[in-house]
Image: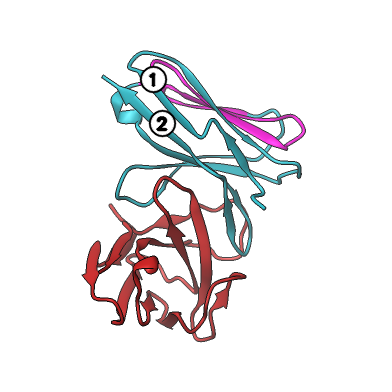
Amino acid sequence: GAVVSQHPSWVICKSGTSVKIECRSLDFQATTMFWYRQFPKQSLMLMATSNEGSKATYEQGVEKDKFLINHASLTLSTLTVTSAHPEDSSFYICSARRTPRVLNTEAFFGQGTRLTVV
Amino acid sequence: TQLLEQSPQFLSIQEGENLTVYCNSSSVFSSLQWYRQEPGEGPVLLVTVVTGGEVKKLKRLTFQFGDARKDSSLHITAAQPGDTGLYLCALPGAYKYIFGTGTRLKVLA
């Protein structure tokens, strides 16, 4: 069964509103989680690394104020898309590992969230 | 710039055909993983290769890590519609993963 759960699976929101996406590790504690964005028919683009109890690490070009990440517990990270616009429409995926900072471990992915901003 | 280049980018084949997907880089990898992503889902790990020249088999899928550890290939024998999806190679670093450009495979019945 799934070890990383993402919610919601899809969401439609109006332009200018904010949307929160949750990512939970179900049977392990994740001090680090990763958030990706995926455009249609393209690969995964790492947006940021979520760190429990501290600030997220954002990749170059990703707006911190636009994509707010909170990792308040060892099993939950949230991504909030603030003041969403149609160009933010995309597939957002989170992932986590059972053993962080170790090479070659498996990354477990959530089911993804399809965000459509109208 | 993308560290991992995959080819082909898209592939549409008939059921029963064989195919090979490639993952290349100008850098040496310490290890490499292959994932498959089905539409509307997150990727799922298929295999991890760590030794140059290593070959691993998973049913009809054969994975090879290049001798120089700068490339890898995925060969599918007798493809089936269930193999349809996005295949991604990835560098499983200690701090973050880097994914390849992806190969989108469609197997027609």
Q: Is residue B59 left or right of residue B20?
A: left
In the rendered image, which quarter is residue B14 located in?
top left
Q: Which chain is red?
A: A
Q: Which mark is residue B13?
A: 1
Q: Which mark is residue A70?
A: none
Whether residues under marks 2 and 1 lie with C-beta atoms below 8 angstroms apart, the answer is: yes
Looking at numbered disc 2 in the image, what kind of residue is underneath it?
Leu
Looking at numbered disc 1 in the image, what kind of residue is underneath it?
Ile
> B50 or A62: which is nearer to us?
A62
Q: Is residue B56 above or below residue A34?
A: above
Q: Which chain is cyan?
A: B
Question: Residue visible at 30% across and 22% down?
Answer: B108
Q: Is residue A39 above or below residue B13?
A: below
Q: Is residue B81 above or below residue B48?
A: above
Characterize the local packing of mark 2: few (<14), some (14-19) or many (20 or more) Cα atoms within 10 angstroms. Answer: many
Residue numbers of the magenta segment: B55-79
Question: Residue visible at 70% across and 30% down?
Answer: B66
Question: Residue visible at 72% across and 37% down?
Answer: B70
Q: Residue A3: image x %, image y %?
A: 34, 59
Q: Is residue B39 left or right of residue B97?
A: left
Q: Residue A70: image x %, image y %?
A: 43, 82
Q: Earlier in the sequence, mark 2 or mark 1?
A: 1
Question: Residue visible at 42% across and 54% down?
Answer: A39
Magenta-drawn stretch contains A107: no
| Chain of the residue where label 2 is placed in the rendered structure | B
Discs 2, 1: same chain: yes
User: What SS does tag 1 mark?
Assistant: strand
| Chain of the residue where label 1 is placed in the rendered structure | B
In the rendered image, which quarter is residue B106 located in?
top left
Q: Which mark is residue B105?
A: 2
